[in-house]
Amino acid sequence: MNRMRLYLHRIFRRPAITHPMPIHTRRIPDGLLLDFEDYFTYVIEAIADDEELLAMFLEIVDDRATSREHDGWEPEELLVEKLAERVGHEIPFRGRALAALADRLRAGIPAPTVTIPQPREGGAAA
């Protein structure tokens, strides 16, 4: 059932941001999911198409595969930072696109819960 719901979402989703990179939203019971599929695809393609970025990524993979005791130092962290800097890790929102995203995020805020007080037993308090 969840898979069917995901398929229907992909067919009928409306992007919150349409230019230059669409960002979609999907409501869930307690909020929203932001769908960055197009940005994720861009990152994968950027790494695959650039030999230097691909080599950096493969070095990260090799570093993570090397078995070692964890001493708090992660050698691949610097490479991940360099890779993120080269590919880009921020998505700009400007003007109408920012307003549209803000409206979508506001609409996704779950309604506040209301508590109904319990009636007192034995009549009203004096």
Image (cartoon, rainbow, N blue to C red):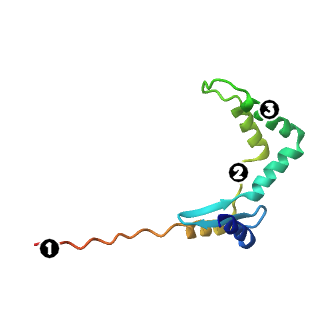
Element under disc 1: loop
Element under disc 3: helix
User: Residue 79 location in percent, x, y?
Assistant: 74, 34
* Disc 1 and disc 3 in contact, CB within 8 angstroms: no
* Disc 1 and disc 2 in contact, CB within 8 angstroms: no
Residue 29, above or below 82? below
Residue ID at (79%, 45%): 87
Residue 51, above or below 109? above
Q: Amino acid at mark 1?
A: Gly
Disc 1 vs disc 2: which is toward the camera? 1
Q: Amino acid at mark 2?
A: Glu
Residue ID at (50%, 67%): 110
User: Which quadrant does the N terminus fall into?
Assistant: bottom right
Q: Residue furthest bottom?
A: 123
Residue 122's disc is 1
Q: Which residue is mark 3?
A: 59
Compare residues 33 and 69 and report the one nearer the observer: 69
Q: How many marks?
A: 3
Q: Earlier in the sequence, mark 3 or mark 2?
A: 3
> What is the C-alpha distance between the residues marked 1 and 2?
61 Å
Q: Amino acid at mark 3?
A: Glu
* Disc 3 and disc 2 in contact, CB within 8 angstroms: no
User: Which quadrant does the C terminus fall into?
Assistant: bottom left
Residue 22, above or below 121? above
User: Residue 92 location in percent, x, y?
Assistant: 71, 56
Q: Earlier in the sequence, mark 1 or mark 2?
A: 2
> What is the C-alpha distance between the residues marked 3 and 2?
23 Å
Residue 90's disc is 2
Give neighbour class at mark 2: few <14, some 14-19, many 20+ (Cα, 10 Å).
few
Disc 3 vs disc 2: which is toward the camera? 3
**Quarter of the image holding residue 55?**
top right
Q: Earlier in the sequence, mark 1 or mark 3?
A: 3
